[in-house]
Structure formats: C-alpha cells, structure tokens
Image: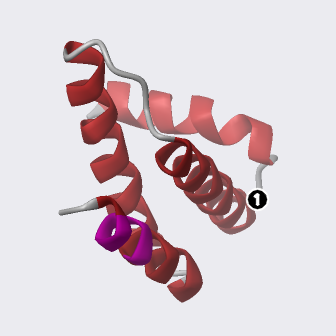
C-alpha cells in the first residue's frame, strides 16, 4: 500500500468513529513503525499524526464507555492484556 492509499484509509477510519476500525488502524501503523525501526528509519509525519489522532479518539471513546479518565485508559488496557 502506498502512502496516499494509507493516508486515505486512515482518514476514512477516523471519520467512521468505529472503534474497531480505529484499533485496526492503530495496529497497522504500529506494525509499520516496528518494521521501520528494524530498518533504522523514522516514521513519516503522516503516520505519526494519524497514529496520535487514532489513539486519542480510541482513548476518548473507551474512557467514556468505561467511565474512567482518558489518562487512565493506557493503564487499563495494559492491565487487561496482562490478565489475558
């Protein structure tokens, strides 16, 4: 997938406000980040921007649904993963 297609898909995922789509997007961008790190390359500005936007959107939705503060969401996720 080229940069324009990736950017278009990220934009669409953010516009849908579908948490599953946003989580998939985060995973895809994280996987891409890991590959780029292995090749000693930096993330693109667009990848960083969309990752940050998606993470903020997902944390906001989860915080509201769980009745917790947005700042507590990363710890909540980490705890749930540890229990799995």
Secondary element type, mark 1:
loop
Q: In front: 18, or 54?
A: 54
Residue under the image location 45 percent in, 77 percent down: 13
Give the side of residue 49 with respect to residue 24, left or right: right
Q: Please identify the quarter of the rendering in which residue 10 is found.
A: bottom left
Give the side of residue 7 with respect to residue 65, left or right: left
The segment highlighted magenta reads 4-8
Quadrant where the C terminus sits is top left
Answer whether residue 25 is magenta in the image. Answer: no
Residue under the image location 65 percent in, 62 percent down: 57
The percent position of residue 65, horizontal first and vertical second, equals: 66, 68
Q: How many marks?
A: 1
Q: Main secondary structure of the magenta part?
A: helix
The percent position of residue 25, horizontal first and vertical second, equals: 37, 60
Q: Please identify the quarter of the rendering in which residue 3 is found.
A: bottom left
Residue under the image location 41 percent in, 77 percent down: 8
* Label 1 packing within 10 angstroms: few (<14), some (14-19), many (20+): few
| Residue at the farthest bottom position | 16
Which residue is under mark 1?
67
């Amino acid at each position: 997938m080229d940069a324009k297609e990736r950017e278009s898909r990220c934009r669409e995922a953010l516009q849908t406000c579908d948490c599953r789509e946003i989580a998939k997007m985060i995973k895809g961008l994280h996987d891409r980040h890991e590959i780029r790190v292995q090749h000693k390359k930096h993330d693109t500005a667009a990848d960083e921007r969309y990752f940050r936007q998606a993470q903020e959107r997902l944390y906001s939705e989860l915080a509201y649904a769980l009745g917790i503060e947005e700042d507590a969401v990363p710890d909540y996720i980490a705890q749930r993963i540890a229990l799995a």
